[in-house]
Every structure is written in structure tokens, then in C-alpha cells.
Image (tube, coloured by chain):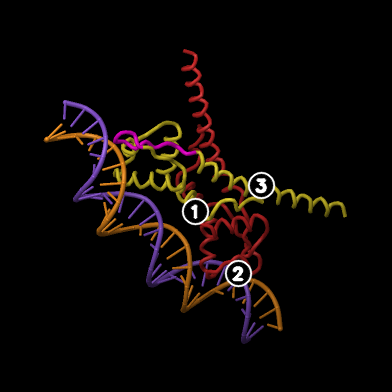
Chain colours: A yellow, B red, C orange, D purple
Amino acid sequence: MVVDQFSDAELDRLFQALADATRRDIVHRVTVGEYSVSGLAALYAMSFAAVQKHVAVLERALLVTKEKRGREQIVRGNHEGLQKARRLLEEYEEIWRQRADRIADILAEENSD
Amino acid sequence: MVVDQFSDAELDRLFQALADATRRDIVHRVTVGEYSVSGLAALYAMSFAAVQKHVAVLERALLVTKEKRGREQIVRGNHEGLQKARRLLEEYEEIWRQRADRIADILAEENSD
DNA sequence: CTGATCTACAACCATTTGGTTGTAGGATAA
DNA sequence: TTATCCTACAACCAAATGGTTGTAGATCAG
């Protein structure tokens, strides 16, 4: 069980960041292509500052990176955060699978009485 | 791209539920074994009502189920929520992989000039 | 240089979240 | 029956969240 390879705070930020539809959409878009912050802001029915905050949340969660290019700030997907979140869920599912196996074993033993 | 097979609200609840260390711990524990709500409450340095609320959040997110047994309420892990969350992240990672392949293709074409 | 564009950040506001305490009801044990 | 245990739920509070507007600094275009 390697569940605790991530810090609580890190995982809090990760899942918190993913718990908003606008931010999930941003993650999706910047994984496919590149966007400036204002390019992203143009996509949503909210202010530039609001989108800027969403990007900041994603950046702290390691789900995107920003890189300055001229007067623009280019946002790109960051595989790191995605990987960490998926790995934790996979570990939980592995535990689930082991438990299912254990129960199957118990039932098998009962049957062999 | 089968990204949108889940509703936004459903995913909001799912990731929001996972964005708290106490709740992640509860998910872990009730996947391994069974706990009553008060059994869980005994594990954490917070009130019974607080733990009760955490369980309710997990239940709405389909990460646990509750079943009445006598005067106790038994909490068990629910694979459904876990699966949904993991699948979404896997789809994102698949998009990421495709993007990496596409870039590799572009680079290959440039090299063959 | 001037004006337009892109970004950063502060201040503010309403709502949600994560916790508390208190009250009440159903199930169990003595 | 009575006392105890487990749960549900309301009311409350502080802090975080998700949004806004406004101001100001860089950078680019003309």
C-alpha cells in the first residue's frame, strides 16, 4: 500500500482544483493546445480576473504551467498533477480489488467446509 | 474523446468530496472494512456531527453507501464514484498522450525535410 | 511617444464549506 | 420501563471559494 506517497495538502489542492467545471475545461483545452490567459478568458462568460484566478488554482495544483511570452502568459497542461491524482485513485481501486479477492477467498473457504 | 459522459455537477461533487484528507481517509478505511458512522467518528479529532457531514458528502458523491443495521448505520466503500473519477483522469491522460504523439509526428516531418 | 493589449493584484461581496453545540428520536441492554 | 447508544438535523460561526470592479505595470503596434 503506497497510498501515502503524496502530501495531504498537495492532494487537497489537486482534487479541489478539479472540482470545478470551468477549471476542468481549462485543463482539457490547454492539454490539447496552447492558450494565453486572455485567450482562455475569451471562452467563458466571466471576467478576465476570474479566469486568471482559476488558472492560478490549477497552477498551484500542478495541473498547468505558465510561461511568459512577450506580453502574454502562455498556459500549458502539466502532466504531473494529472498523474498524481490518477495514481491515487488507482491505488484506491487496487485496494478495492484486493478486498474483493479477500471476500472471494472467505466465501471459497466457507464453501469448502 | 468520451470526456463528457459525466455531468458537471456529478464530477464537481466527486472531486470536491476527494479534496479533503479526512474524507480520503474515510474512503480508504471503508473500502478495506466496514465502519459505523460512530466507529468512524471515534477515529478523528472532531465531533460526531462533523464526521457525519463528511460521510454525507461522500455519499452524495457516490464514494460510499450507508446501510442501516440495528441502531447503527454501516458505511461501505462504493466503487462507482472511484471508477468515474479515475476514468475521467485517464481520458485526460489519453488526450495528453495523443498530443505527445502528434508533436512527435510534427518533429518527425520537420526532420524529414 | 501614444494608445491599446495583456497581465497582476487588491478590495470587496455572496455563498459554500468545515467545524461547533444542542435537541430529538429510534434501537438496544439491563 | 428506563437508561444508554447511535443517528439525524437545525442553528450558528469562521474561513475559504468564486465571482466582481478598479488600479497599475509591461509590452507591443502605429
Q: Which residue is mark 1?
A: A12
Instruction: Determine the chain carrying the residue at label 1.
Output: A
Q: Give the numbered dot on residue B42.
A: 2
Kind of element beneath mark 2: loop
Could you confirm whether marks 3 and 1 are on the same chain?
yes
Name the amino acid type tagged 2: Ala
The answer to whether B93 appears left or right of C3 in the picture is right
**Disc 1 and disc 2 in contact, CB within 8 angstroms:** no
- Front residue of B7 and D25: D25
For mark 2, does the 10 Å Cα neighbourhood hold few (<14), some (14 to 19), or many (20 or more) residues?
A: few
**Disc 3 and disc 1 in contact, CB within 8 angstroms:** no
**Disc 2 and disc 3 in contact, CB within 8 angstroms:** no
Residue B65 horizontal/vertical position (percent): 60, 56
How would you classify the magenta stretch by its main secondary structure?
strand
Kind of element beneath mark 1: helix
The segment highlighted magenta reads A68-78
Instruction: Determine the chain carrying the residue at label 2.
Output: B
Name the amino acid type tagged 3: Glu
Residue A69 magenta-highlighted: yes
Note whether A66 is above or below B36 in the view shown. above
Name the amino acid type tagged 1: Asp
Q: Which residue is mark 3?
A: A94
